[in-house]
Amino acid sequence: MSIYQQGVATNHIDLLDQVVRLVTGSGVVSNLSYSGTGNGQLHNPDAHPAAVTESWSITCTDATAPAIFSVQGSVSGLQSSATVGTHYDNALVLFDLSAGDSDFQVGDKFVFDVTAGEMPADERWEVLRIGGVAEISASSYRVNYEPWQLLKTGYNVPTNPWATALGEHSNCWVGWKFFRPAEINRLVIQCSSTNSQAPKEFSLEWSDDGVNWNTREIFNGYTWANNETKELTITGESPGAKLYWRIVITENNGSSDTTSLQRISFPEFQDTADINFGRLPAVWLRAPGLTGNGPAYIAFQIYDRPTDDYYNWAINIGTGFVRDADQSSQPGVEAGALPLWNQDIAYKAGVDGQHIELVVQFDTVTFPLYVGKFLPYGTPGQYPYPAIIATPLSQPNMTRYSHSSVILPFKGNRDQLKIRTTSGDWINPYAWPYSSEKTFRDTGGEYPLLPIVLYDTENTYGTLDGMHFITGFDNAAGNTVSVESETHTVFSDGALTGFNDYYCMRTQ
């Protein structure tokens, strides 16, 4: 059963968040309200895939600091209690409660609604690993020494450190917002090539809202060699998973010019391997699989370089998942990339238990993506793993969306379209009818949707699911085609408007 969704994401990171929620069937939180005396807050309410459609009441039952709240769903019933200052997660909903200037009183109540995700339970994708930094900022920085330089990505390891503005060498900070709430129990910091600029007196702090901060750990008397790396163990009681964290530096090791750091990393996200794909949001997913044998293993990783104005997704599909391996080292893996930007992105998506098709539109461009499994011409025994990745970029390279190498993958016989054969090899198949020398047109004003058939000189492998060829004869991008209760939307290959430069995607 395919689920269809369309909307507008605020940027490339929000688009990933919306896609992850769609494929996992995560619930959506809305209508948060509060009644009571205290002026504390409930932050970052969210819902797991197991959540059902219901209202949740979070009610103060003990006002003694830290206040205790009951947690009750209108369907799920009474759950374990929540405590102010401690991250709450009952596998259905999660949130944080913080105190304000006026204490909570017994009976103070927060209420919010949860709408269950549409993905059927037996087709939901499972999150195998998710993490990364969604935002990073600092008290100040110099040009070419921005705070994003602190965190590496698999396709861009910055050479410059983060450095404060000249003269602002004390009482400075660098902070980040995680893609999902996370604990920090270990922290790795690398000094820049000038050890006098490294932090001597500093602290790690957390926040529920990015405004009000709490100390997690204080570090005193640290000295460094040039380019030295130290792993810091965080002691004491953890506040739980938090979205917002920062390092506050009160004093460096003697520089009156600037304070700097070369790199920050979070070892608990990396297991035993140095996961190069850990700076920006990344997610490893397992779709249950509907054709062939077994699930599909699909990963999305954001990589960007703001100074070069590219904000892209790296996309991988493989035959398995190894927790201690990074994205490009998974079993049987093949890669592609989707170029995006950091502003509003309109999208249309279709997803089932083994693939996602996605069309994004922003600025003056339109790009499609298809990854997962296709519909094979064969039984599971004959074709056990019909995997496909079709992306506008053949590899996760440092290419802006406006570059001429960004093309429609569905036309076939090109590096942007790859399928896995029964021998385990990845090939670039032809795609009919794009490969045909024939010209297609409508019949009496009716536009047939033709299957996109994947083949080579020896085999015909199968077709795409939800994506079709449509002729461009007297046609235009944005038109729709109705097939019984289905609606299919027409798109073109960028600025190309030839008869064979169009495709159609089911959108409802």
Image (cartoon, rainbow, N blue to C red):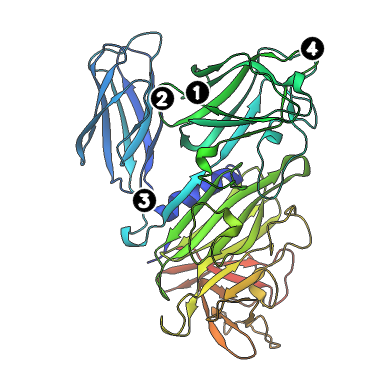
| Residue at the (33%, 59%) spot, across then down | 120
| Residue to which mark 2 is pinned | 239
Nearest to viewer (mark 4 / mark 3): 4
| Residue at the (49%, 17%) spot, across then down | 215
| Residue to which mark 3 is pinned | 117
Let me know if residue 4 appears in the view.
Answer: no
Along the line of sight, the residue nearer the viewer: 168 or 340: 168
Q: Look at the numbered disc 3 and give the secondary structure of its residue.
A: loop
Amino acid under label 4? Ser
| Residue to which mark 1 is pinned | 206
Q: Is residue 157 left or right of residue 383?
A: right
State which quadrant residue 442 falls in: bottom right
Callouts 2 and 1 close, C-beta under 8 Å: yes
Callouts 3 and 1 close, C-beta under 8 Å: no
Amino acid under label 3? Gly
Q: Which mark is residue 238?
A: none
Nearest to N terminus: mark 1 or mark 4:
1
Nearest to N terminus: mark 4 or mark 3:
3
Callouts 2 and 3 close, C-beta under 8 Å: no
